[in-house]
Amino acid sequence: MKQVDLGIARMAHVLWESELEEMVQKHRKTIHLTSHEDCELGLWLHGEGIRELYHLDPVRRLVGVHEQFHQAADRLVSMISMGAEENIEREMNRVRGLSRDIVYFITEAELDYLEHKPLSDFSAHPFKSFIHRLFNIHLPDPGEIEKRGVLEVSHARLMHLRWSRQLLRAFQHWGKDASLESSDLCSVGIWIHEVGLKHKEIIDIVQELDDRHQLFHTKAEETIRLLRRKNFRRSEELFNEVTNLGREVLYLLTRIELLLLQSGEVDSPINILKHP
């Protein structure tokens, strides 16, 4: 199983969800819905994904969440067909939440796969330099970023998840040994300010990412402060907010990655699939 298969599965899902969003916004009453086993992600999950990556906990959890997503999508289409306007936005919000969970679990699977794969296996792989940067301790210098390379978006996305996992461990240990960094100095912040905001054609979604990302860091810092003061109830509430914001950051990075690929602004290391 190649790492790029996970990226293709992630892109396929976001493309499919975009069609649902368009259906709701334009009040279209017809859409071709596949089952959770027949869409691009489902085919991967119930084919190669199950056979080769089911040992990864995120992949096992992804199977159930993906099925729930399709169930919610089916309900959404039925509501639109029946004109049940009062329930459409509620169900669309459920679809959005499940979609963010899906992107999160796929990203977890990507990171777990990379962390347990010997680097020597990537010696002739198009992701080689990216893999080595991912497992390097220091952050990439802004001047070294390939400003037109979609790999840098994936690097920022996976580094964000690694940092989120460190925050979870800190939360479990009452904030001890937590390493907090500025929102401008982490991989996502560097990408936003050195690369993302210079892409005028996607400026709106990059600015949305910047807002969500800054709020993620602000609430993460407050969570650690509350833990160290032993204010466990409020710290748990805030940590749940941080978790949701973290998933939003991963989702927005995936949307940006897809937009850059579709625009032709960057060369893709994968063959982007047809619209599902």
Image: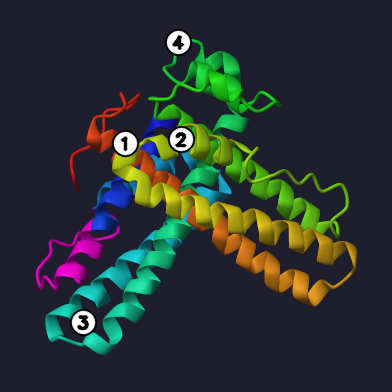
Q: How crowded is mark 1: few (under 14 residues within 10 Å), some or many (20 or more)?
A: many
Q: Which amino acid does label 4 sit on?
A: Ala
Q: Write down the residue under mark 3.
A: 79
SS of the residue at dot 3?
helix
Cα–Cα gap, marks 1 and 3: 33 Å
Q: What stretch is highlighted in magenta?
A: 19-38
- Asked whether the residues under the numbered discs 2 and 3 touch, taking CB atoms below 8 Å apart as contact, a structural biologist would say no
Q: Which residue lies furthest to the top in this view?
A: 124
Q: Which amino acid does label 2 sit on?
A: Val
Asked if residue 87 lies left or right of residue 99, the reply is left
- Main secondary structure type of the part rendered in magenta: loop
- Asked whether the residues under the numbered discs 2 and 4 touch, taking CB atoms below 8 Å apart as contact, a structural biologist would say no
Cα–Cα gap, marks 4 and 3: 50 Å
Of label 2 and label 3, which has the lower sequence position?
3
Q: Write down the residue under mark 1.
A: 260
Q: Which amino acid does label 3 sit on?
A: Met
**Picture disc at residue 124:** 4
Q: Which amino acid does label 1 sit on?
A: Leu
SS of the residue at dot 4?
loop
Cα–Cα gap, marks 2 and 3: 36 Å
- Asked whether the residues under the numbered discs 2 and 1 touch, taking CB atoms below 8 Å apart as contact, a structural biologist would say yes
Of label 2 and label 1, which has the lower sequence position?
2
Cα–Cα gap, marks 2 and 4: 21 Å
Q: Write down the residue under mark 2.
A: 153
SS of the residue at dot 1?
helix
Say which of marks 2 and 3 sits in front. 2
**For residue 97, above or below residue 251:** below
Of label 1 and label 3, which has the lower sequence position?
3
